[in-house]
Amino acid sequence: MRRLTRGWWSHPGALFVGACLSIVPAFRPAQAAAPPVETEDAELGPSAEAGPAPEAVDASASDEGAAGETSDAPETSDAAGTSDAPETSDAPETSDAPETSDAPETSDAPETSEVDVPGPVPEPSAVAPPRAGDMAANPDPKGVHGAGPHQANPKIPPTGKAQMWFRSTTFFDYFSDNYNQVSNDDRFFALVNYVNFGVDARLNKKWKLSASARADTHNVFNAKSQNFCDPNNDGTISDSEASQCNFGSDYRLERINLTVKHKKFELVAGDFNVNLGRGMALSVRKIADIGIDATVKGGKVGIKTKAIELTGIGGIFNRQQSDFATRTLFPDPGYPHLLCENTPFLTGNRYGNRAMTMCSDIVSAGRFDTKLPGKVRLGGHYVWMWFGQPVLGEQHEGLQLFGGDISRKRIAKHWDFFLGVTGLLRNFHHRDNYPGLVEDGIAAYTSNALVFGDTEVLVEGKYYNNYIIAKDASATTVQYAEAPTLERQDQIIPAAGNTAGGRIRISHTLKKSRVTVYGNFLSYAFAIDNATPLVGAANSEMLYHGFAGMRWRDPDKGSEVQASAGYRWEGFQDVNPSADPGSDVMYNRRMPHAELYINQVVGKTKGMDHSLSLRVDWRWEEVYKTVNGDKSFHRGNAILGYGLSPFFTFAFIGGFSTEFEQVPDFWPGAEARINFLESSFLRIFAGRQVGGLLCVNGSCRVLPDFEGVRMDLILSF
């Protein structure tokens, strides 16, 4: 039920709670573990690599917000003249992300951006195509001056000043069993292919032109007599079953892009990613771990001068139709607006028009950035979205976001500062006839990064009140915005839209021993619904999460050790109102956790490193439930890997979970990967992968359990 909330402008200020010690070990023990996401340079996936592990990373948006493994916010800045495409998008590299960002430079991000624990294998991200002008042969093909042999990196021969590129991503999967209550989604094969191709050209010294497209094919093949659309296996398919069945084959032109670029001007037509206001105002990007691959399909204009940078966008939200976890198909987000209702051609396919997405949520936005005296940067933005789903009969839903931010780097040579505020106004067009549909909210975030020699300190705070962008957003659709959570990337966020608190992290590196020690403490108040005050009410809740650890590397000996441990508590500020009478139970969820990673190079053959690695992560979680009482379980992974860098990796994977009685406790598997070209590889997984809730930067999805075989083949030229 929608309600009119108090004006965001009436709040006295942000409530910043908590603080003390931080840097985070990356871990996924409590949720479905995600496997490697392929980076642009096609580094070896950590699931099978006995090489550098992800460093204990605080996935906070405060720092460098990567568009992938180790951050809470997109890495892109709001600067005009650069594409906001994350590194893992399918956009050509000529529409590259900015070389610099407004984020503090003190970050816990690992030198290698690999994800830690294997799980349901997401789509590998696109490797950036070669840039025009970057056509020189490798000057050291045998690795004489490097760490080892280099792999071949074939390219399509250039034509004049134009460089064509091609990338094919093929998935061949066999789904044996997902351990749910039905069998129609078991025992089938899936063959999915994404073909990316394009051309980058330098027209002259000042102008660049790039064009690209992506065509997707999706096919499923039943290996049983039961029909995909007959979940009760009664031999007939009812109208209701047919309407809810998303299995099928599909072929479409998923992406298209044309970019004209100048030092002071950029024009984009087609599909592009975007990030405004560090993700608080707008963030549309790829989050491969949970199956999100979204763009804005429309237009973008960027203008850059010495005094100001301007960016304007407009279009509709477009998402990938094929789901990696289930191999079902998804429709485009949104609703059949007036144009689609009167144009049957656009709605002929239930998943969206195959040639051009049209019937989807609509967005337009603008952003400015300017430099003030004293090296202060000031920015502002406005976003308008039209969701359209009727909220009361035929009344449609719209949203406006407006705000700004201020930042300054290297204050007194030690301090990076950022403060951003964005206001939300929902359904303002209904203020006269349906005032109960009008809502408002606010998001405020600040980050302070300090560096004193070998010691780094990060202090962050957030205050979000009724800051919910898309109320009915699916986990596999478009996330629209990613306000910084201050959390580790992999954490379940209990209430991202109504929360106030902060965190501190401290790290120090010992020069002689090369050991880095760190600690983190996070605390914030939150409310599940906007009607509950953040502090003082019976249902007001609190969260505490503290952890500490160390990491040590000796590059000369090829050695690395990482270890961390911590404790997380979520519960009520007073006795749990749903607990048994007389009980003093306050918690909803509590969890100790520990992580260990060891890697050692054990030999060399013709410049190639032989290495072994061991990764173990564990957690014991206790959840208070009113019906079943306490629920406690263990969950984690043990991975033993071997790597022959840079050509081959192999890993034995032993997942374990005692959370559910109906499924196995042990989830064994094995994964092998062969890198036969610099940006091309074959990866095969066979075994079981435990499902469950998987979260990335506050965006969560329940993934199904998996038993079967997955194969990925990437070819890039």
Image (tube, rainbow, N blue to C red):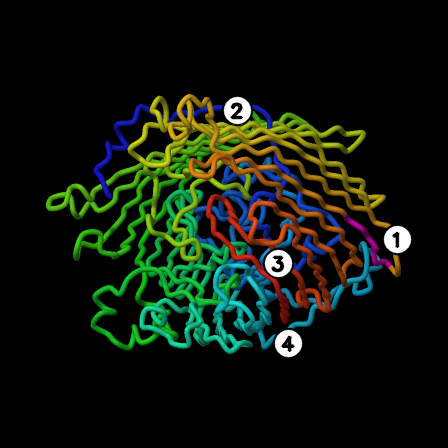
Q: Are marks 4 and 1 in contact (CB under 8 Å)?
A: no
Q: Amino acid at mark 1?
A: Gly
Determine which of the numbered discs, if any, sits on residue 239 in the image.
Answer: none
Q: Nearer the viewer, mark 3 or mark 4?
A: 3
Question: Is 458 located above or below residue 29 in the figure?
Answer: above
Q: Residue at x 44, y 38 (%)?
A: 494
Disc 3 is placed on an element classified as: loop
Contact between marks 3 and 4 (CB within 8 A): the answer is no
> Circle 1 sits on which residue?
603
Q: Is residue 176 left or right of residue 255?
A: right
The answer to which quarter of the image holds residue 421 is top left
Quadrant holding the N terminus? top left
Mark 1–mark 3 Cα distance, whole angstroms, equals 26 Å
Magenta-colored span: 607-613
Of the numbered discs 4 and 2, the one sitting upstream in the chain is 2
Real-space Cα distance between discs 3 and 2?
Answer: 34 Å
